[in-house]
Amino acid sequence: MAIAASALVLASALTAQADEPGACPGVDLVETNLTKGTSSGYYIPGLKLIILNRAILANYAPSVQHFILAHECAHADPAVGEDEMDADCTASKRGITEGWLGAQDLIKVCVHLARFPADATHPPIQVRCANIRRCAREAEFEIARKPALPPERDIARTPLMARNFE
């Protein structure tokens, strides 16, 4: 908790708006530059607060940075909570849906996650990456099966006699 307190002193808090890219509505975001830190980001449930360490994140591709934020944001969802596999899955699906996570990006995310050893809450990297790839495929499938929207007609260019005046 001392790190979180230091982060609050060192950084300014930002509340994400719903329409911002990578937003996590209802959760405060604190950006730090802790050069001696090892974590790129984490979520503090009781405070609804995400701490992102920009000193670490600066070393990673934008897609990895987005994934980390989306992963931490997923923890704020009560349906996900502290489940790391669910948070990874949610972040993966969000990346595919929002268009910032592709095949090469999945590799970069897995390389980043490989830095961290498995522990009581984090499964081994092989398990996490298989889960992330599976969730990405599910999101791609959902996108592919959505029917294409018909092109909108420009009413101003539609001949008057063809307009429906009901």
Image: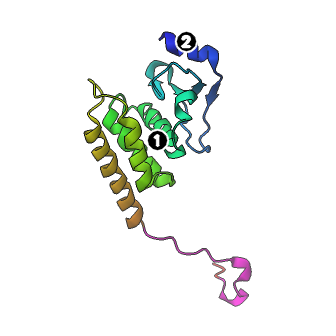
The residue drawn where x is 55% and y is 12% is: 5
Answer left or right for 16 relative to 79.
right
Residue 3, magenta (yes or no)? no
Answer left or right for 97 relative to 138.
right
Characterize the magenta stretch by its predominant secondary structure: loop
* Distance in Å between CA atoms under marks 2 and 1: 24 Å
| Span colored in magenta | 147-163
Report x, y in % for residue 26: 55, 31
SS under mark 2: helix
Report x, y in % for residue 140: 38, 59
Whether residue 145 is visible here, answered yes or no, is yes
Quarter placement of the C terminus: bottom right
The residue drawn where x is 56% and y is 39% is: 23
- Residue at the spot of label 2: 5
Establish if 81 lies above or below 143: above
- Residue at the spot of label 1: 67
Q: Nearer the viewer, residue 56 or 119?
A: 56
Mark 1 packing: few (<14 Cα in 10 Å), some, or many (20+)? many
Check the image and name the residue furthest to the bottom: 161
Q: Earlier in the sequence, mark 2 or mark 1?
A: 2
Which amino acid lies under the numbered mark 1 shown in the image of this protein? Answer: Phe
The residue drawn where x is 44% and y is 55% is: 102
